[in-house]
């Protein structure tokens, strides 16, 4: 619906729309040809918009996954690393993206699920959108060790250094840059940066 029709409750009375309303009161033949040209351009624009929309829909549908979980399934929960730690120079490699697995208690809506969270996450609301969940595929050889990551109510955590493992200075043309290898709290020795 056009904005004009939304506001006033009737179709637009411009010359382009007159043939849609079946009302022609134009006597000048140059005006009639102008209206016909404008109507053809409007049809061409609508056709091209429809083509663009269908190609975008096709592209999106190829990449879209419809995720559905059943009550009792185990899922991982997506968390967001603290943005300040990204700005400190460390990359995103060491930061966990998912925590869990947690059990689904109830399906609230088409895309919302309620999870059973541990007591240390009791301040977080336990209903999540399906985009924040990832299915856990159980593997008998995979033993999960619960990590003690402190997450606040916005699902953000802070990464803290434990100790410095190594120091050296990188020399450029006219200055030296001190480099430090750091062991982080929630990561092993092989993940030190």
Image: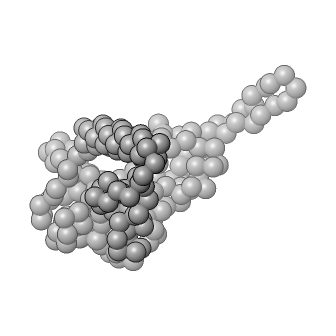
Quarter of the image where the N terminus is located: bottom left
Residue drawn at the location 16% of the way across and 71% of the way down: 106
Q: Nearer the viewer, residue 22 or 172?
A: 22
Compared across the picture, whether 187 is left or right of 55 comes to right
Position of the C terminus, as image quadrant, is top right
Whether residue 63 is visible to the viewer of this picture, yes or no, is: no
Query: How many badges with numbers are in the image?
Result: 0
Colour approach in the figure: one colour
**What residue appears at the point 37 percent right and 40 percent down from the top-left corner?**
40
| Residue that protrudes farthest toward the front in the picture | 27
Residue located at (47% from left, 42% from top) = 30
Q: Residue furthest bottom?
A: 123
Query: Which residue occupies the foreground of this view, 34 or 17?
Result: 34
Residue pictured at 28% horizontal, 41% vertical = 54
| Figure check: 38 above or below 175 | below
Q: In the rendered image of this protein, does residue 185 appear above or below residue 39?
A: below
Q: Position of residue 160 (x, y in %)?
A: 56, 56
> To which quarter of the image does residue 78 belong?
bottom left
Where's residue 113, x and y in %?
22, 67
Instruction: Give the residue furthest to the right.
Output: 174
Give above or below for 130 relative to 142.
below
- Residue 71 visible: yes
Horizontal and vertical percent position of residue 33: 42, 41
Residue 65 lies, in percent from the top left, at 23, 46
Say whether residue 83 is left or right of residue 189: right
In-front residue for pair 144/51: 51
Quarter of the image for residue 105 reads: bottom left
């Amino acid at each position: 619906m056009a904005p004009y029709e939304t506001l006033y409750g009737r179709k637009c009375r411009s010359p382009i729309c007159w043939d849609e309303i079946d009302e022609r009161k134009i006597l000048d033949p140059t005006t009639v040809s102008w209206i016909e040209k404008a109507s053809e351009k409007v049809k061409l624009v609508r056709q091209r918009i429809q083509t663009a929309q269908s190609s975008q829909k096709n592209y999106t549908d190829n990449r879209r996954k419809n995720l559905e979980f059943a009550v009792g399934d185990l899922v991982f929960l997506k968390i967001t690393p603290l943005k300040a730690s990204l700005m400190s120079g460390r990359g995103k490699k060491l930061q966990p993206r998912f925590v869990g697995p947690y059990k689904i208690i109830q399906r609230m809506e088409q895309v919302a699920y309620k999870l059973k969270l541990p007591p240390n996450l009791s301040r977080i609301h336990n209903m999540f959108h399906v985009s924040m969940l990832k299915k856990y595929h159980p593997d008998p050889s995979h033993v999960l060790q619960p990590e003690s990551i402190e997450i606040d109510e916005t699902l953000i955590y802070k990464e803290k250094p434990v100790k410095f493992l190594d120091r050296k200075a990188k020399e450029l043309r006219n200055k030296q840059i001190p480099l430090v290898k750091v062991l982080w709290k929630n990561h092993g020795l092989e993940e030190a940066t």
